[in-house]
Image (cartoon, grey):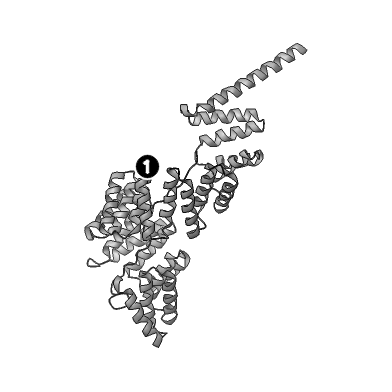
Amino acid sequence: MTKYYFRCVVLVFLLIIGGSLYGQENPKANDLDKKIEEYNRILAENPDDAKTLGLRAYCWSKKKEYQKCLDDSARAIQLQPDFSAHHYVHAYASAYLKQYEQALKSINRSIQLEPDCAGSYRLRTDIYNATGQHEKALADINTAIRLSKENDPECFLYYYSRGKTYMDMKQYDKALDDLAKVIELDPAFSETYNVRGLVYFKQEKYDLALKDYHKAIELDSEAPLPYANRGLLYCTTEEYDKAIADLTRAIQLDPEEINAIHNLGCAYNRIGESNLAIQQWLRALEINPCDKRIYFNLGSAYYDQRDYEKAMPYFEKAIQLAPEFAEAYHMRGIIHFIRKEYDQALADLNRMIELYPKPHFYAYYNRAGIHYALQNYIDAMLDYKKASEIDPDPLHSDAYSRYLALLLCRDVDIFNRNRNTAKTD
């Protein structure tokens, strides 16, 4: 009955910028520390060198030190407000820090200053996708593809971003077409295989998804996301040892990969290691204390351990974060029922039934039990009947048996009342 949530992972923002960003070749990954030292020396002599601040901001972004990137690019913008590259890098860092409003403001300014830069539309595509504005994202990435030149080294990225956009829009065939184009243009870009694996996963084509995750890892064994998503696939196919190995590897590569941490908790929970699951979910909360599903999973784990006092605050927090989270009302209602707080239990089950998109067997079955405890026998009988209609599976025949028992009690009660009335007459 208890439901747990898994998460898939896709790279949201990708900063690959050609040598034109600051009018010179951008630093290579293995030169970042050396370049930062060089820029530090220049800035020590001239703190207002906007170009050097911009180059150092770029280095910070490649090292995933986004706050430092944000600070340097903000200072560069103050000194050189009409240079589009500063706004571009500032938008990228803002987006990675989930400051989406600021990210849009910065990338809009970059586009305003350089309206024919295809890369800026691609970055805004990713920001729109991150905020669920997929139609705007699609319009932007189509503009990027139109503006791109045949010899543009970033051309493959535009089709990659459009493929991700189509995936988010659940237009999977179009997504696969674009991702195939990316592989044609750059067969060594590992992230394409990760995303195509996700598309196949969403289509429940697990063999094809697994093949693509293998390829992504073969091309880049240090990238955490293919391990994270392959781990999720192994969870889905109930190969939990493999799942735990992959998810653990993803976390080793990126200790703040929250979805891998979250899913590792789910994998441990599935093999009965609820304490290990709880450890992972508490760790995930340290990274993101506003994730309703982590609170729900923690509440469910404590519920399964019959530690209702610990479980209750997590369901309440999930509801506070997401007032339309139907399953959280259901679980909180069950705990109220266990505590014999029947009125509160009934209110929660009513809310669950109101919110859930389709009739739910356990919601009606458990509400019937609450009605019975409140001696609302007719309502209990009707809810048991409803539950048995929702799922007539023999495993749930108890609902129908209880319905028949209450129906019989009702008929006997009516018969006795009629017989007593007849005797009185």
Q: Is residue 378 visible?
A: yes
Q: Quadrant of residue 402?
A: top right
Which residue is farthest bottom? 45
Give whichever of 342, 161 is nearer the camera: 342
Q: Residues within 10 Å of mark 1 (few under 14, many from 20)?
A: some
Q: Give the vertical position of 2 relative to 400 (above or below).
A: below
Which residue is farthest right? 424
Q: Give the vertical position of 100 relative to 47 (above or below).
A: above
**Residue 247 in the image, given as x and y percentages of width and height:** 38, 53
**Residue 89 in the image, given as x and y percentages of width and height:** 38, 71
Q: Which residue shows up at 40% across the image and 56% down it? A: 134
**Residue 418 in the image, given as x and y percentages of width and height:** 70, 15
* Tally of numbered discs: 1
**Residue 63 in the image, given as x and y percentages of width and height:** 37, 69
Q: Which residue shows up at 54% across the image and 24% down it? A: 401
Q: Is residue 89 left or right of residue 384?
A: left
Q: Quadrant of the C terminus?
A: top right
Q: Which residue is mark 1?
A: 238
Q: Is residue 244 left or right of residue 316?
A: left
User: Which amino acid does the dot numbered 1 rest on?
Assistant: Glu
Q: Is residue 51 visible?
A: no
Give whichever of 33, 97 is nearer the camera: 33
Q: Secondary structure at mark 1?
A: loop
Give whichever of 4, 159 is nearer the camera: 4
Q: Which residue shows up at 54% across the image and 28% down it? A: 399
Q: Quadrant of residue 250?
A: bottom left
